[in-house]
Amino acid sequence: MTTIFEKIISGEIPADIVYQDELVTAFRDIHPLAPTHILIVPNKAVATVNDLSEEDAAAAGRMLLVAGRIAAQEGIAESGYRLIINCNRDGGQEVFHLHMHLLGGRRMGPMVARN
Ligand code: DGP
């Protein structure tokens, strides 16, 4: 099933793209939860972390490298930031195209809400 992120990667629908290469694309979240809230996604449509295979290792690694580079560009590398990947229902995943949230520009608070 095609997700909105595939259309962003291909340029079919607009997004504030901050980085793109042959493996990954990064764009600003439409509903930012912090001054910097960027999504980093593999260009290949992988639904969740559960669906990653060995052939996706380069893209998965690139997501992490790009996160650090973008954090530096955004001026939050030293102050710090949080990287989040939600998976399926309990993780709170809404869009089923693997994505890493890069959040920063303010204190992020507790890692997860206590129930
Ligand atoms: P998650 O809950 O981890 O699946 O997060 C999905 C994120 O995707 C959520 O923070 C909002 C963002 N999002 C959903 N639709 C769009 C869109 O069309 N454009 C952009 N830029 N972000 C979107």
Image (cartoon, grey):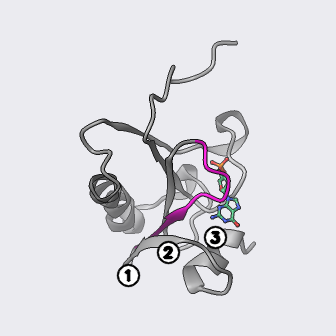
Who comes first in sequence, dot 3 or dot 1? Answer: 3
Q: Amino acid at mark 2?
A: Asn
Q: Residue at x 57, y 23 (%)?
A: 112
Q: Which residue is mark 3?
A: 5
Q: Amino acid at mark 3?
A: Phe
Q: Which residue is mark 1?
A: 22
Q: CA distance from mark 2 to mark 1?
A: 7 Å
Instruction: Find the residue positioned furthest to the top.
Output: 115
Q: Residue at x 59, y 54 (%)?
A: 48
Residue stretch rendered in magenta on the structure: 24-33
Who comes first in sequence, dot 2 or dot 1? Answer: 1
Residue 18 quadrant: bottom left
On the image, the x and y values in percent for residue 101 come to 51, 49
Label 2 Cα neighbours within 10 Å, binned few <14 / some 14-19 / many ≥20: many
On the image, the x and y values in percent for residue 90 come to 69, 33
**Mark 2 and mark 1 residues within 8 Å of each other at the beta carbon:** yes
The verdict on label 3 being within 8 Å of ligand 1 is yes
Who comes first in sequence, dot 2 or dot 3? Answer: 3
Specify the quadrant that holds the C terminus. top right
Q: Which residue is mark 2?
A: 43
Q: CA distance from mark 3 to mark 1?
A: 15 Å
Specify the quadrant that holds the N terminus. bottom right
What number is the disc on residue 82?
A: none
**Mark 2 and mark 3 residues within 8 Å of each other at the beta carbon:** no
Q: Nearer the viewer, residue 87 or 94?
A: 94
Q: Residue at x 66, y 59 (%)?
A: 30
Q: Residue at x 38, y 39 (%)?
A: 81
On the image, the x and y values in percent for residue 4 come to 70, 71
Label 1 secondary element:
loop
Q: Quadrant of ligand 1?
A: bottom right
Label 3 Cα neighbours within 10 Å, binned few <14 / some 14-19 / many ≥20: many
On the image, the x and y values in percent for residue 78 come to 24, 39
